[in-house]
Image: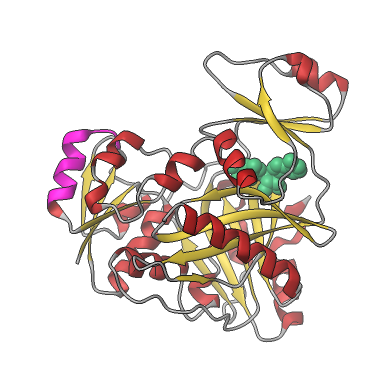
Amino acid sequence: MRIGIIGGGQLGLMMAEAAHHLNHFVVGLDPNKDCSLSYEADEMLVAEYNDNKIVQLLSEKVDVITYEFENVDLDLIEHYLHCIPQKSNALALSRNRFIEKSFAQNLGIPIVQFELLKDVEQITYPSIIKTTTGGYDGKGQVKILIDEDIEKFHFQPNTEYIIERFFDFDYEISVISTRSLTGEVVHFPIPKNTHKNGILYTCEITDEISQSIQKQAQKYSQQIIDSTDYVGTMAVEYFVKEGVVYFNEFAPRPHNSGHYTIEGCNVSQFENHIRAITNMKLIEPILLQPTCMINVLGHQRFLVDRMTFDICFYHDYYKNSSLVNRKIGHITCISSDEKILKNTVDYIIGDSNE
Ligand code: ADP
Ligand code: MG
């Protein structure tokens, strides 16, 4: 088939790799002609995402379109729903944190206390103020931990915020799930995620997470993916505290915390995404070996030189390496020996965690 991908970042790149693995033809759309996807796509349309004429052209060139990020033009996606199996329901919710969190709350999923922030008087601490739209990798977030933080916070024009209680969670997880056109859902093994400065840092997949936590999280993800009638790979991030799973946010696309599936599982999150949108049968994911993924940011390229090649794999996103705090690649380590895995990860991370 011919697949169109809107968005040329690393997710688009890895979607295209999976599409080629299944012998599909890929046409990408991104304003940057040197974007990550351009290194893998068979053809690129270089234009803004909201260029109606170009999306029309894309829809004429391909059988099916997918998007790899959330800040696509919602109206445009809705106009081309006939060739976008992913649809727009989940996208419309996840683009706005207040709407997204209200949706999860209405499904009965535990959630950290949050409300729309209208006035400075509402601010108490410890809390986190987050913009309702456009935020990612911790951007648009302000921690309020002391009185002075309140004074430092200023409402920006035309910006809506939520204020959320600062949550002293035990750890974070995410559930990566894929839903087919016929409504079949498969879940990937659940990674434990660590963040640094709001950016995902490592994902570790071992058998540490209890069955009860896994079951709760998968049940909530199933509710979210079914009630949005989503097709493709979706990720839901959760906080875990004292055996209870709390919703954080979801992404209607493959997710950074699912990159480990490329080497760690019998099928990757990207392959199942492509299978779903092209109406192929999904593959039930199985963890092959304990796995850990480490993100590499622009100022940390030296991490790659610490890889031990027999159990580590590097994925480069073909980005300008000087980008501070921007993801330029990731390393996946796999080993049946958890001690070797841990030692390898500790060695790669080394003092970069300081
Ligand atoms: P983003 O869209 O930037 O990923 P998140 O809401 O997921 O936004 O926040 C990024 C990270 O910040 C989370 O993964 C978590 O580590 C931390 N964080 C977010 N909200 C809270 C909270 N209420 N309490 C404590 N930590 C939080
Ligand atoms: Mg997040």
Highlighted magenta segment, given as a residue range: 49-60
Looking at the picture, does residue 138 appear above or below residue 243?
A: above
- Picture coordinates of residue 259 (x, y %)? 52, 64
Question: Residue 295 falls in which quadrant of the image?
Answer: bottom right
Q: Is residue 70 visible?
A: no
Magenta span includes 59: yes
Q: Residue at x 37, y 45 (%)?
A: 88
Return the residue nearer the eye: 334 or 288: 288
Quarter holding the N terminus?
A: bottom left
Looking at the picture, does residue 47 appear above or below residue 259?
A: above
- What predominant SS class does the magenta segment belong to? helix
* Relative to 210, 191 lies left or right: left
Return the residue nearer the eye: 316 or 183: 183
Q: Residue at x 68, y 69 (%)?
A: 214
Looking at the picture, does residue 157 appear above or below residue 25?
A: above
Question: Residue 163 falls in which quadrant of the image?
Answer: top right
Return the residue nearer the eye: 259 or 182: 182
* Relative to 99, 242 lies left or right: right
Magenta span includes 51: yes
For this orientation, the residue located farthest to the bottom is 336
Which colour style is shown? secondary structure
Q: Residue at x 55, y 47 (%)?
A: 298
Return the residue nearer the eye: 43 or 106: 106
* Relative to 203, 93 lies left or right: left
- Picture coordinates of residue 17 (x, y %)? 34, 66
Q: Residue at x 49, y 58 (%)?
A: 225
Q: Is residue 173 visible?
A: yes
- Picture coordinates of residue 327 (x, y %)? 53, 49
